[in-house]
Amino acid sequence: MLLLLPPSESKRPGGSGAPLDVSVLAFGALAPLRERALDALVALSEDPAEMTRVLRLTARQAGDIEANRAVRTAPTMPAVDRFTGVLYDALDASTLDGRARAWLGAHTVIQTALLGPVSALDAIPAFRLSAGHRLPGLPPVKRHWADDTARALTDGSRFVVDLRSEAYRALGPVPGSVYVRVVEAGEDGAVRALNHFNKKAKGQLARALAQTRPEIDSADALRDWGAAAGFVFERAGEDLLLFAE
C-alpha cells in the first residue's frame, strides 16, 4: 500500500543532514519541476518585501524568508521528522523503532508544495511554501504539480490510501485511491467532519500502520485491519469514513 500524507505549515528547524540533493528524492521524474520551484523560491527570497506579500507572511514568520533563501544550502532531516503540528505530533516518528521507520520510508509519501511528493525518509530542508501560493514565473502551485504528480503516484499497482487535505490532494489526484475522511457521530446520529481531531486521527492511523506493517491491498482490507487495531471505518461511496474517538 501507499499512504499519502499532507505536509504541515510548521516545521522543525535545523538538521544534521547534507544540503538538499534533488537527484536522490523519491519520484525522480519530478526533478525538473522541483528545480524550477526551488529556483523561483530562492529568487523570490532576494526581495523580502515581495516574498512577504506573495507568501502572505506575518511579522512572526519573517524567519521563513531566510529559510527560503538558504533552501539549497541548509541542513536537512527526514521529511517525517521535519514537519511538526497536530498530525506529526500524533505520528511521533522519532519514537518509532527502525522497522517502523523503514515502513514509513517504503510506504508513506508526504505531499509538499515545493518539492512535490517526497518519501517520508527523504532528506529535506526547512522552507515556507503552501498549496495556495504562486511563485513568480511559475503557474499556481496546483497547476505546477498536478499532472506530473498524478502520473508519478499512479505509476504502480499499489493500493493508495489518501490522507491528504483537499488542498494538497489537488496537487496530485490519484484515480482509484481511497480518500479517508475523519468524522464523528453526534448524539443526533449526524456525521460531522473534524478539524483538529482530523489531523490527530490521521497521525495516529499512520503510526499504527507503521508499527503493525499490515499487508493491505483494498479498502475492505483496511477496514478489517482497522477493526482489530481500534480504528472504525465505514464506506461512503468511494471514500472511507474514519470515526474519531
Image (cartoon, rainbow, N blue to C red):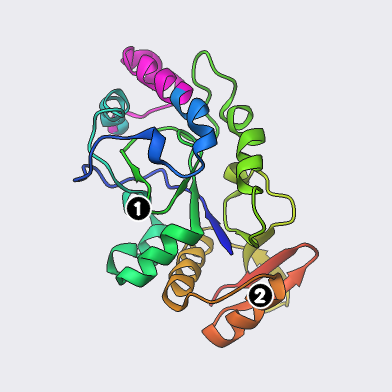
Q: Secondary structure at mark 1?
A: loop
Tag 1: amino acid = Thr
The image quadrant that residue 240 belongs to is bottom right
Q: Is residue 192 above or below residue 116?
A: below
Q: Dot 1, how many residues are within 10 Å of its Cα: few (below 14), some (14-19), or many (20+)?
A: some
Residue at the spot x=52%, y=13% of the render? 137
The residue that disc 1 covers is 84
Q: Is residue 89 above or below residue 208?
A: above
Magenta-drawn stretch contains 78:
no
Magenta-drawn stretch contains 59:
yes
Q: Are marks 2 and 1 in contact (CB under 8 Å)?
A: no
Q: Earlier in the sequence, mark 2 or mark 1?
A: 1
The image quadrant that residue 67 belongs to is top left
From the viewer's perspective, is the residue at label 2 or at label 1 nearer? Answer: 1
Give the x, y percent position of residue 19: 26, 35
Give the x, y percent position of residue 48: 32, 16
Tag 2: amino acid = Ala
Magenta stretch secondary structure, dominant: helix
Is 145 displayed left or right of 110 in the figure? Answer: right
Query: Can you tell which mark lies on residue 185?
Result: 2
The image quadrant that residue 176 belongs to is bottom right
Give the x, y percent position of residue 136: 49, 15
Q: How many marks?
A: 2
**Image: magenta residue range:** 36-60
